[in-house]
């Protein structure tokens, strides 16, 4: 730790409880810290500069104590730790940190002060231990530029069913995390169903789509998946079931009967949800609704708890090499708007938004003449294609009968003036009088 870089990596890990590390070692390391603060331009400790200050900082040391520290420091400055020593010390420190954290967790549990899921805390402690052991002091990204760009150049990943989204976003890849938001009863479930049934066949054979259902009964979602995959209504699906052809047709489309797994998680904690993702080999995780997952009780306010939830979900997508889609609600401010804005997520102006790579807003008009129209906006899009629009602002057709969204041929991003005129249509008389004008506008006439 005479090297500043190594010191910065390790100093925060060392327990300062007075038990794990002896007093002489902690005294030296504390003085190392003083030295680096006093000489910010020094990348390593200089023995001739350090020793006088060490004596100055400890004026009461007896001659035999000073001789002891001089011998230790002479040894420190005369040779470097080899790689085996580094790794041994790192493992030792990681084990101390883990043991201390586990002891604190047990104490919180025994005293009734634990406010979050115990399994989740234990998982986080173990994750931290693994990260500590994976530290390498000379690691840097040494991939060639061709290797780093190969996914972008080949446009690898999972495509959307909707062409308007593919035009604005690169394909989805493991670690990507996005929010799909809409007003209640405006087709969020159908949108997810429409898309994941298209995405299923694009996954690696051993990966699955895990639909984490936290709202109504999950049994209601499964028939919707069959409708979206096959493109039929309830009556036609019933006829296919009677003819014993529905399941085969579904499997032909998505790849396996259990490729899309709907799992009810009502009342479950974040630790239990993570176990579900691991056990089911999730390639795509649908969090429906992530806001209701428990285990974030230590946050003082609703917005802080939600921010922690979404940040947790994003980190899990990276950890498990998975794509994440989280459904959320648009607040009342976005009711009737074609293109709700970034800050119109329920209970969050910035927290949820900061944890995602993209935010897809499903807009809907209150005009009955437009009940089958939806408008898709991407007010946040970190996956933008270099040659595409960041925000498609596209009209799409919502067919609730079969649970499908489809592109509108020739649709275009209508102007803000046109949007304002459409959203001002409220009364039946106004709706009837302007119906032909709106139809003409939206068809591109």
Image (cartoon, helix red, strand yellow):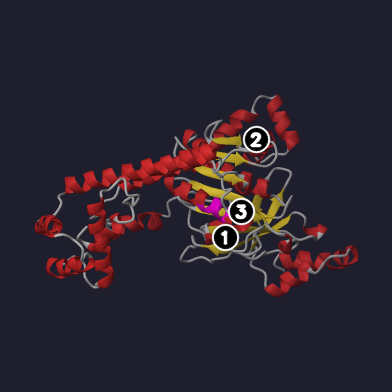
| Neighbours of disc 3 within 10 Å: few (<14), some (14-19), many (20+) | many
- Asked if disc 2 and disc 3 are in contact, CB closer than 8 Å, the reply is no
Camera-side mark, 2 or 1: 1
Identify the residue under disc 1.
Answer: 351
Q: Secondary structure at mark 2?
A: helix
Camera-side mark, 2 or 3: 3
Give whichever of 328, 200 is nearer the camera.
328
Q: Which residues are magenta?
A: 305-311
Residue sitting at x 21%, y 67%: 43
Marks 2 and 1 sit apart, C-alpha to C-alpha, by 31 Å
Q: Disc number at residue 180?
A: 3
Q: Is residue 236 magenta?
A: no
Residue sitting at x 15%, y 51%: 81
Give whichever of 201, 100 is nearer the camera.
100
Residue 216 % position (x, y): 70, 39
Q: Is residue 174 visible?
A: no
Prevailing secondary structure of the magenta residues: helix
Q: Earlier in the sequence, mark 2 or mark 3?
A: 3
Residue 400 % position (x, y): 73, 46
Q: Is residue 41 visible?
A: yes
């Amino acid at each position: 730790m005479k090297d500043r870089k190594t010191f910065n990596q390790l100093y925060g890990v060392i327990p300062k409880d007075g038990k794990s590390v002896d007093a002489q070692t902690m005294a030296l390391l504390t003085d190392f810290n003083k030295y680096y603060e006093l000489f910010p331009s020094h990348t390593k400790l200089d023995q001739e500069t350090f020793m006088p200050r060490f004596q100055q900082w400890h004026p009461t040391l007896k001659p035999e104590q000073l001789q002891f520290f001089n011998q230790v420091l002479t040894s420190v400055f005369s040779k470097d730790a080899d790689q085996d020593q580094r790794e041994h010390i790192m493992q030792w420190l990681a084990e101390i940190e883990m043991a201390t954290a586990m002891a604190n967790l047990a104490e919180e549990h025994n005293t009734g002060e634990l406010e979050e899921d115990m399994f989740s805390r234990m998982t986080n402690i173990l994750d931290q231990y693994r990260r500590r052991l994976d530290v390498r002091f000379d690691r840097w990204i040494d991939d060639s530029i061709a290797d780093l760009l190969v996914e972008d150049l080949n446009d690898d990943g999972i495509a959307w069913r909707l062409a308007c989204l593919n035009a604005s976003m690169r394909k989805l890849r493991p670690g990507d995390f996005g929010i799909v938001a809409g007003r209640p009863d405006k087709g969020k479930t159908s949108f997810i169903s429409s898309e994941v049934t298209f995405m299923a066949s694009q996954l690696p054979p051993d990966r699955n789509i895990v639909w984490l259902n936290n709202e109504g009964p999950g049994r209601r979602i499964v028939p919707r998946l069959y409708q979206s995959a096959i493109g039929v209504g309830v009556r036609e699906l019933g006829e296919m079931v009677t003819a014993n052809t529905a399941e085969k047709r579904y499997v032909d489309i998505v790849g396996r009967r259990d490729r899309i797994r709907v799992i009810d998680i009502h009342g479950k904690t974040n630790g239990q949800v993570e176990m579900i993702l691991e056990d089911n080999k999730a390639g795509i995780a649908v969090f429906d609704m992530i806001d209701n997952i428990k285990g974030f009780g230590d946050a003082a306010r609703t917005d802080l708890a939600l921010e922690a939830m979404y940040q947790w979900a994003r980190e899990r997508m990276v950890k498990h090499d998975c794509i994440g889609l989280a459904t959320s609600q648009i607040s009342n401010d976005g009711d009737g708007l074609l293109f709700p804005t970034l800050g119109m997520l329920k209970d969050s102006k910035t927290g949820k938004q900061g944890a995602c790579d993209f935010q897809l807003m499903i807009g809907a008009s209150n005009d009955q003449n437009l009940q089958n129209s939806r408008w898709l906006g991407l007010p946040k899009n970190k996956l933008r294609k270099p040659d595409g629009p960041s925000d498609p602002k596209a009209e799409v057709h919502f067919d609730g009968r079969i649970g499908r969204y489809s592109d509108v041929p020739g649709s275009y991003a209508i102007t803000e003036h046109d949007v304002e005129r459409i959203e001002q249509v409220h009364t039946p008389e106004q709706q009837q009088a302007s119906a032909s004008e709106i139809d003409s506008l939206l068809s591109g006439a």
